[in-house]
Amino acid sequence: MKSLKTFARGGVHPDENKFSANAAIEALPLPKQLVIPLGQNLGAPPKALVKKGDIVKVGQLIAKGEAFISANLHSPASGKIAKIDDALDASGYRRQAIFIDVDDDIWEEHIDRSEDINRTISLSKEEIVARVKECGVVGLGGATFPTHVKLMIPGGKTAEYLVVNGVECEPYLTSDHRLMLEKGEEVLIGIKILMKALGVEKAIVGIENNKTDAIQHLKKLAENYNGIEIQALYVKYPQGGEKQLIKAVLNREVPSGKLPIEVGCVVSNVGTAFAVYEAVQKNKPLIDRVVTVTGKAVKKPSNFLVRIGTPVSDLLKAAEGLPENTGKIINGGPMMGKSVSSPDIPVVKGSSGILLLPREESKRPQPKPCIRCSKCTVVCPMGLEPYLLAKMSKLELYEKAEKDSIMDCMECGSCQFTCPSNLPLLDYLRLGKQRVGHLIRTRK
Amino acid sequence: MNDILLFTLLTLGLLGTVMAVILYFVAQKFKVIEDPKIDLVEDVLPKANCGGCGFPGCRNFAEVSVKAANETQSLEGLNCPVGGNAVMKAMAAILGLEVEEKEPMIAVIRCNGSKANSPAKVQYDGPASCAFAHNLFSGEGGCQFGCLGLGDCVASCDFDAIHMNPETGLPVVNDKCVACGACVKACPRGIIELRNKGKKDRRIFVSCINKEKGGPAKKNCSVACIGCSKCFQVCPYEAITMENNLAYIDFEKCKLCRKCVEVCPTDAIHELNFPLRKPKPEVADAPPKERPAKVVAEAAAPKADETSNETKPDNIA
């Protein structure tokens, strides 16, 4: 038996805890009010087009991304604009948001709401990119990078492969897994559309081997789609990082500080592929997404199809309530997610899951001195020396940290996960990255 | 035996002489010509090497000052906040220049979101550093502008002038403060401001930097500036400006009349080291102009030091 592919350097094996893997995607009813933060994508936030009192329909453009790296926002419900005001984001900071009072579910006429699968890709390359841009599709893996920008390959470079991320290496989360199982064909058509837009012949879908049902399902479907290969991967965190995924499926290494296109690859998430399918074939903008609500004490771990802007508290209610001893509500997975300061925050394009951690698990253990065991160096998937970079960041030796490639850190948290002394390595690295990034920007 | 001694002495003596001659010529050849004033100036500086002047250490400040004196004949823009006027005068005397007297400054904490005023809604258990916490969340009390209470300012202070008050969870500045500005840079929220020390240490300032509208600001903290503009309207000296729902008192224009303190509905404006107030009518009857701070100051002079502690608002020293 051939051993499964994976990335070469580092990685950890956290407990998988995929409680919601068998819970079918469930559409959540519309809440009374939606809060749509403007800055949901990486890059510049879009500019609001509506004003207080305007009546909007589902799918109507409500904010337009004008900068190069920006994404449009569409109304996820029909109703009246209540106000444009500041709303709490996940970390408790107030950011500008559009509040919509929902009264009905009236859709824009041009959106195809039928369930039929549309298999013929009639749009041309340029039309696809324009449609994806128009529909405000962003990378749904978590980074929320505007997809249309990714599809515009910089001059002089050519893409050879489209690498599709179905890894879902974060413990607990299952939204991509369910999507592949339930909307497999749509995902594959989405991949075909992306391939056409990029002008590539080959696409590889990387899926970790703990989702055997999804692998088999997609393998069967892919027989009808030329050029799409389904690749089972050995389970290891952080395989979902784009550089790790490329290394795993193609054994190519992206150079430090460069983008995947340097080695002829473009990486996209399966959720993004589905959103692209909906945008291109159904004319439906990105107004909803699959969110996992899970946790050890959650009564009903579920995967919900929710409209953007739905408060997280509604999701918790649908999962039969907040367990009593919840210590932290985490937006995202346990490795890279951030704990939120209030359950009233809205679901945004980048929310892949809501994780409830019991109190005893959510406490940070007391840090002890570094014992130079070098475990962090062994597990770092980018080949960095986290203990050293953390020290540099602590001592404000930012130039030295930059030289030692602190900017290559992708904040996967493997170092902190494995540290026997419970040192806050990732916190130091994040701070260092922020300061070094500031240094680099001011130098220009 | 004697021969050996003689030989040794002669060899070493000769070697020493030759080396000395070589060293002399080398020293002449590579002599660094330095203004002797630099050493003199450095001698009068406090040698705290705190960087409060904006230069890396006292020696560098002395070099820059002497250079500026030689080239532009003025010490404009150069100030040693630690040494204050005395040091600047001594320095100017060495350089044969004059300096303007600068009013002494002090660090002021512009947040009063204590544990009582802004009760914790969430709990932070990450590393005890404001820089981390600022990246992660808005603060235990929910105010995204307020003090995080983890003491980055305390760690940055070289003069033992700032400490955390465990009861309120806010930092407190004491008299040792020399206004070097290290805490101002260390605070990720920009709460600390260097302000005029004021006559008899009396200061009035808005102890809040919340730029939100009144509602949300007040929701998180009972003593937030809600941007009501009452102080702006009452100020006879145009010292108060309103921007982004926040009042700011310009300490250069403020005459310490304390009218703003009285009208503030949330007690966001603080007065420090003032004597106890006289009964209300007298203050209210004050003539509009010509009765600025000096009257108040004189009246209060005898007992200022004794009363200063009692009249301080609870959370600020």
Image: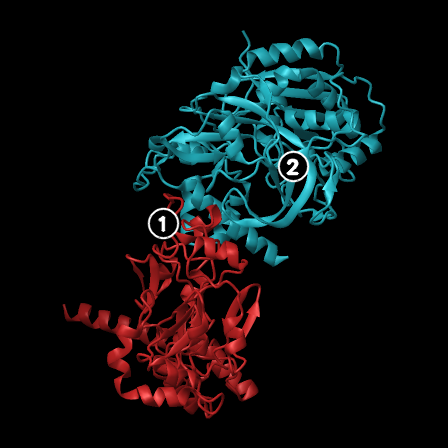
| Residue pointed to by mark 1 | B128
Of A322 and A380, the residue lying toward us? A322
Colouring rule applied to residues:
by chain
* Dot 1 amino acid type: Ala
Residue A430 percent across, percent down from the top left: 48, 45
- Give me the chain that's red: B
Indicate the secondary structure of the residue bearing disc 2. Answer: strand
Residue B155 percent across, percent down from the top left: 35, 59
Of A242 and B68, the residue lying toward us? A242
Callouts 2 and 1 in the same chain: no
Indicate the secondary structure of the residue bearing disc 1. Answer: loop
- Give me the chain that's cyan: A
Residue A87 percent across, percent down from the top left: 56, 47
Q: Is residue A15 above or below residue B59?
A: above
The chain carrying label 1 is B
Q: CA distance from mark 2 to mark 1?
A: 43 Å
| Residue pointed to by mark 2 | A102
Image mark for residue B40? none
Crowd band around label 1 with a 10 angstrom C-alpha radius: few (<14), some (14–19), many (20+): some
Residue A212 percent across, percent down from the top left: 56, 12
* Dot 2 amino acid type: Val
The chain carrying label 2 is A
- Depth check, mark 2 against mark 1: the one in front is 2
Q: Is residue A185 visible?
A: yes
